[in-house]
Amino acid sequence: MSTETMEARDFLAARIAGGVPKAAVVLGSGLGAFADELEQRVEIPYGAIPHWPVSTAIGHAGKLVFGAIEGLPIVVMSGRAHLYEGNTPAQAAFGVRTLGRLGVRVIVFTNAAGGINLDYSQGALVLISDHINLQGSNPLTGPNDDSLGPRFPDMSEAYAVRFRQIAREAARESGFEMPEGIYAAVSGPSYETPAEIRFLRTIGADLVGMSTVPEVIAANHMGLGCLAISCVTNMAAGIAQRKIEHQEVLETGRLVRGRLVSLLKAVLPRLVMEVS
Ligand code: HPA
């Protein structure tokens, strides 16, 4: 995997004109709109990048977009590799590792999630303060790649406190409050049962989803700063007395796009300042 991420990095490095981005954004299901906002866009389909896993999930574009917001170079992963597509945990972490090798220092993850905390409502944007990994796997299993990070990386502040403060302030400036919550990562692809949701609430989860955690583990391994924002696309199973449908997940994602785009635009330059 090490030589693969370096080959992908070299391929990308040869194609960036506007400077190496310090910040990356990973866009979740139905949240792809942000990529269209970049100035001087250069789009590279995942299929064109050596070894990059191609995402098959509906609602995911499957391309890397280089560009800028107000002159600040950034890179956007529009679409990600999920475990439920049959990807290994290392494949799920491939994009993050390649971007880390390219020089990215800050990554903002977005995802669609089910709301477990009854204080949330559909369409809410929630800052992930911590996670519980219930996927039964970890991208760091196997021989440790010492060029990426240590064998036993610390995860006690996986989602940087300072980044969360910055995001909360930016949300407030845009006129909304962003609560924090604990994200439980499951493998999917079936949605949870109501009994599983009661279990997740009991163990302290506020949100449930099928992504992000392998990427955040890989990012922390490399010492990258992480911020993660969940869009509550639906209340979790058994809360509203109706079925959960992927279509609804995508539609809610589209409804919050404006709020998410302006939040990301406000937050990214401040996060980059923080690590400069
Ligand atoms: N469960 C798991 N993942 C999800 C959900 C959910 O309810 N909604 C969006 N992603």
Image (cartoon, rainbow, N blue to C red):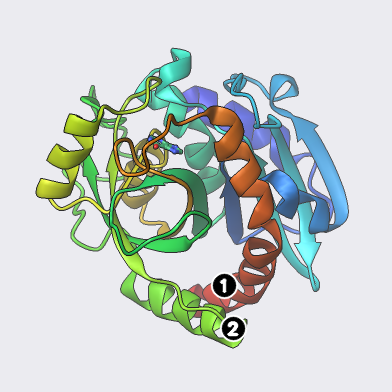
Picture coordinates of residue 83, whole percent (x, y): 40, 22
Q: Residues within 10 Å of mark 2 (few under 14, many from 20)?
A: few
Is residue 29 at all visible to an observer of this figure?
Answer: no
Element type where label 1 sits in the image: helix
Amino acid type, callout 2: Gly
Horizontal side of residue 167 vs 267, given as left or right: left
Q: Residue furthest left?
A: 202
Residue shown at 54%/35% (left/top)? Answer: 95
Picture coordinates of residue 132, whole percent (x, y): 21, 45
Residue behind label 1 places its C-beta within 8 angstroms of ligand 1: no
Task: Identify whether 79 is placed above or below 155.
Answer: above
Amino acid type, callout 1: Val
Which quadrant is home to the N terminus? top left
Residue labelled with disc 1: 272
Measure how far apart labels 2 and 1 are at the Cα level: 23 Å
Picture coordinates of residue 190, whole percent (x, y): 37, 20
